[in-house]
Image: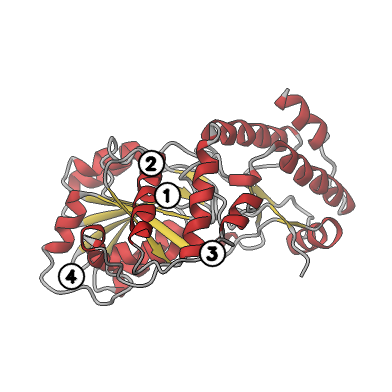
């Protein structure tokens, strides 16, 4: 199978040392006490990335597992949950809330902008009886980055617990779990950290543990029950056999993260990439609140979005993303996250885009590649 040059907003390209780490000989993770220390040490390194002393757990399952597990573990029948919605994933949190018997109450924001915290405060002044709230930091279908710090601070003024999807932002954006009082913060292996898909990780505050322990009824499920993870290290007992090769790969990817100033690299590439697109005559979907990890570009009038992505793949072996839901056919998405946030990778995307847009009759105001190089000087 031919592997494409991957520039999607997750999964991302995986560095060779991560792939090699996954090839290490496996021990028995249930019985080998050294593995419990290895797992715990990796959890602590992940905690440093999101600036927390809270408990961290790594679960066997792609990032969606973490989102569902948080809602499953928090939600009881009839609980009112505030779903902060200015994007497809923001809205989608409500499905998990309702799946476990909760009442999802939506605060809807403009999907071309980050959440307006002033409007949220006005909403909360009138209605704040919520067990917890869900927030998406970076909503990748639109590329919007929400003001997470201010949102969480506003919710905490009313004693509302917070569940944050930071899957597409952790590592590429600053996330300060303890300072911003986040109760559950969710990440995944296949985004900025550039490990293969298959793992989700999350921080769990003392408040979050208490919410789960004070439930009137048990969590409806096993894999999505976070409580079963509470004392794994003290008991030297995992709820299920850990995917040791995936965890070895994630450990190598986390070490890669700490080998440089990864957030600064993402900021630099993202700024240059957006500036290049705009000065070239293309339009971004969001009007502000841009993410360091993904650029969402409006498809110019007269351009066939499906043909554009097909030609990029077939002629250049380059894979970028389209979108779904209300954005299907209207935008293309380039992930400059993880290994994708490299100068040469940005150049390759822009070179191919330049050629295929021209082939469909779109005239750029500036050469994308030349401008990108100039901006990065």
The span from disc 3 to disc 1 (Cα, nearest Å) is 32 Å
Residue on which disc 2 sits: 50
Q: Position of residue 125 (x, y in %)?
A: 19, 43
Badge 3 is on which residue? 25
* SS under mark 3: loop
Tag 2–tag 4 contact (CB < 8 Å)? no
Kindly report the distance in space between the C-alpha atoms of the residues bearing marks 4 and 3.
48 Å
* Residue drawn at (38%, 55%) of the image: 39
Vertical relation: 179 (above or below) 190: above
Circle nearer the N terminus (1, 4): 4
Look at the image and tell me in which quarter the C terminus lies: top right
Residue 99, picture quadrant: bottom left
For mark 4, what is the residue? 78
Mark in the foreground, 2 or 1: 2
Query: If you read the primary sequence from the N terminus, does the residue marked by circle 2 or circle 3 appear first?
Result: 3
Residue 120 in the image: state x and y as whole percent: 30, 43
Apparent side of residue 146 relative to residue 237 in the rendered image (left or right): right
């Amino acid at each position: 199978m031919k592997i494409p040059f991957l520039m999607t907003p997750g999964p991302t390209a995986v560095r060779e040392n991560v792939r090699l780490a996954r090839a290490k000989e496996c021990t028995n993770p249930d019985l080998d006490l050294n593995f419990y220390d290895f797992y715990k040490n990796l959890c602590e390194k992940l905690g440093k990335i999101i600036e927390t002393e809270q408990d961290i757990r790594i679960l066997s399952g792609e990032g969606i597992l973490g989102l569902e597990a948080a809602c499953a573990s928090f939600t009881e029948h009839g609980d009112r949950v505030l779903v902060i919605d200015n994007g497809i994933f923001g809205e989608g949190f409500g499905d998990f809330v309702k799946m476990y018997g909760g009442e999802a109450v939506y605060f809807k924001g403009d999907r071309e902008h980050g959440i307006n915290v002033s409007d949220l405060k006005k909403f909360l002044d009138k209605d704040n009886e919520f067990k917890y709230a869900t927030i998406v930091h970076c909503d990748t279908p639109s590329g919007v980055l929400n003001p997470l710090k201010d949102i969480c601070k506003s919710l905490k003024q009313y004693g509302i617990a917070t569940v944050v999807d930071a899957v597409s932002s952790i590592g590429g954006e600053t996330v300060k779990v303890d300072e911003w009082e986040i109760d559950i913060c969710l990440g995944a292996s296949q985004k900025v950290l550039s490990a293969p898909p298959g793992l989700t990780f999350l921080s769990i505050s003392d408040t979050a543990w208490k919410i789960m322990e004070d439930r009137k009824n048990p969590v409806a499920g096993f894999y999505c029950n976070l409580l079963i993870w509470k004392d794994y290290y003290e008991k030297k007992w995992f709820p299920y056999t850990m995917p040791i090769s995936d965890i070895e790969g994630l450990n190598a990817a986390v070490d890669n993260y700490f080998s440089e100033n990864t957030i600064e690299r993402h900021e630099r590439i993202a700024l240059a990439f957006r500036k290049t697109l705009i000065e070239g005559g293309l339009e971004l979907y969001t009007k502000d609140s841009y993410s360091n990890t993904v650029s969402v570009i409006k498809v110019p009038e007269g351009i066939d979005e499906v043909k554009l992505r097909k030609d990029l793949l077939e002629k250049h072996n380059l894979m970028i993303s389209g979108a779904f839901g209300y954005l299907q056919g209207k935008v293309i998405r380039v992930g400059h996250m993880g290994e994708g946030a490299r100068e040469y990778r940005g150049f390759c995307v822009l070179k191919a885009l330049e050629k295929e847009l021209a082939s469909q009759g779109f005239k750029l105001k500036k050469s994308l590649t030349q401008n990108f190089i100039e901006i990065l000087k």
